[in-house]
Image (cartoon, rainbow, N blue to C red):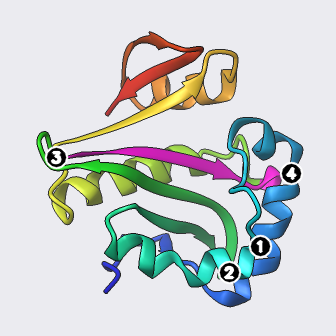
């Protein structure tokens, strides 16, 4: 069973498939967060609960007035130490509004309190300036670089 996410976040619904398809077609999202290979949005959404039950990922909609504004997800869960990797994207009309930072804080606090994670981390492309600003501005620690990615811990 999927956990209840914090306010402003929710689980994917089949009705969100067109919004997810649009996001996967967005050139900025495709550049930094490529969609799964050979996946259609409806099938991907229908497998969210399976991915969670297998401990693979937890994918949540950033919801603004009932619509998909973006996504924040956790994956690469480990038990010792208890941690997960975070990923986030926003639809173009929501970029630069502060929504990403609010969603990042919300899911990070929730993941620690409700999921028991001790650490949340992220990899961002070295040349993704928006991501660098998001994580630095949210007070995450820049741990270094590896394979063209900046490693962050929050």
Give the residue drawn at x 68%, y 80%.
43
Q: Which label's residue is closer to the chain start, 4 or 1? A: 4
Tell me which numbered mark, 4 or 2, is placed earlier along the sequence. Answer: 4
Asked if the residues shown at circle 3 and circle 1 are in contact, with their CB atoms under 8 angstroms apart, the answer is: no
In this figure, which residue is indicated by the disc labeled 3? 82
**Disc 4, disc 2: CB below 8 Å?**
no
Taken as a whole, is the magenta stretch helix, strand or loop? Answer: strand
In the rendered structure, does residue 46 fall within the stretch colored magenta?
Answer: no
Give the CA distance from mark 1 to mark 2: 6 Å
Q: Which residue is mark 2?
A: 43
Q: Residue 26 got which mark?
A: 4
For discs 3 and 4, the disc positioned in front in the rendered view? 3
C-alpha gap between disc 4 and disc 1: 15 Å
Residue 34 vs 137, above or below: the answer is below
Name the residue carrying label 1. 40
Q: Quadrant of the N terminus?
A: bottom left
Identified at 61% across, 86% down, the residue is 13
Q: Residue furthest left?
A: 80
Q: Residues within 10 Å of mark 3 (few under 14, many from 20)?
A: some
Q: Position of residue 86 (x, y in %)?
A: 44, 45
- Residue 9 visible: yes
The image shows residue 35 at horizontal and vertical percentages of 72, 54
Give the CA distance from mark 2 to mark 3. 29 Å
Q: Nearer the viewer, residue 103 or 13?
A: 13
Q: Earlier in the sequence, mark 2 or mark 3?
A: 2
Residues drawn in magenta? 82-93
């Amino acid at each position: 069973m999927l956990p209840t996410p914090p306010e402003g976040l929710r689980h994917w619904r089949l009705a969100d498939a067109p919004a997810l398809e649009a996001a996967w077609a967005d050139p900025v999202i495709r550049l930094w967060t490529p969609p799964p290979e050979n996946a259609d949005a409806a099938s991907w959404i229908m497998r969210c609960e399976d991915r969670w039950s297998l401990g693979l990922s937890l994918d949540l909609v950033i919801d603004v007035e009932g619509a998909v504004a973006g996504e924040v997800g956790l994956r690469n869960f480990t038990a010792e130490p208890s941690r997960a990797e975070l990923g986030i994207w926003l639809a173009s009309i929501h970029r630069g509004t502060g929504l990403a930072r609010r969603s990042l804080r919300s899911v990070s606090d929730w993941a620690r309190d409700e999921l028991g994670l001790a650490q949340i981390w992220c990899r961002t492309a070295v040349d993704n300036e928006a991501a660098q600003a998001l994580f630095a501005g949210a007070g995450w620690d820049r741990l270094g670089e590896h394979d063209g990615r900046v490693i962050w811990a929050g």
